[in-house]
Amino acid sequence: MVEVFSVNKDGDLVDPEEALRNKVVGLYFSGGWCPPCRDFTPLLCDFYTELVEESEPPAQFEIVFISSDKSTEDMVEYYRDMHGDWLALPWTDPYKHELKKRYSITAVPKLVIVKENGQVITDKG
């Protein structure tokens, strides 16, 4: 689905093809400057933890954070402080613009749930 590299919370590069294989993916468009995003992110963390980290077996679900922050530093601070243990598209990656266009993102927060091939399941996540 994603033709670029993602990062985890430790800043390690992750091959998205491998990390997202056979999973439903939540594309989370958000920014730390946005009060509704800061309200929604903890709820999403709880949902993710329950679904992926506490379920046995874990759900085949992953989240990829696509930042609308103003800088790499802002993105990293928001990601590390508030987000769950999911993936993120690097702030400098231009692919985020293509994703925003493809999924008609005009405001944040927005959670788009997609199949492995990128087909939308719902844009009202």
Image (tube, grey):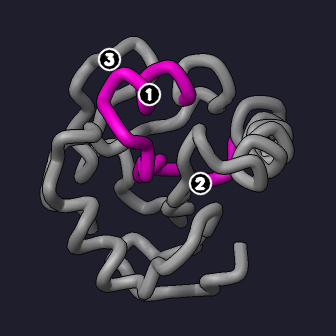
Q: Amino acid at mark 3?
A: Gly
Q: Percent x, y for residue 44?
A: 76, 47
Q: Amino acid at mark 1?
A: Asp
Is 69 situated left or right of 45 in this image?
A: left
Query: Residue at label 3?
Result: 11
Disc 2 versus disc 1: nearer the observer: 1
Magenta stretch containing residue 72, yes or no? yes
Which residue shows up at 46% across the image and 78% down it? Answer: 105
Query: Residue at label 2?
Result: 60
Which residue shows up at 30% across the image and 29% down it? Answer: 72
Q: In this orientation, does residue 124 appear?
A: yes
Q: How many marks?
A: 3
Q: Quadrant of the C terminus?
A: bottom right
Q: In this orientation, does residue 56 appear?
A: no
Circle 3 packing at 10 Å, graded few (<14), some (14-19), many (20+), is few
Query: Residue at label 1?
Result: 74
Q: 120 or 69: nearer the eye?
A: 69
| Mark 3 element type | loop
Which residue shows up at 61% across the image and 68% down it? Answer: 110
Q: CA distance from mark 1 to mark 3?
A: 14 Å
Which quarter of the picture shows residue 19?
top left
Q: 101 or 59: nearer the eye?
A: 101
Which residue shows up at 22% across the image and 26% down it? Answer: 13
Q: Amino acid at mark 2?
A: Gln
| Mark 1 element type | helix
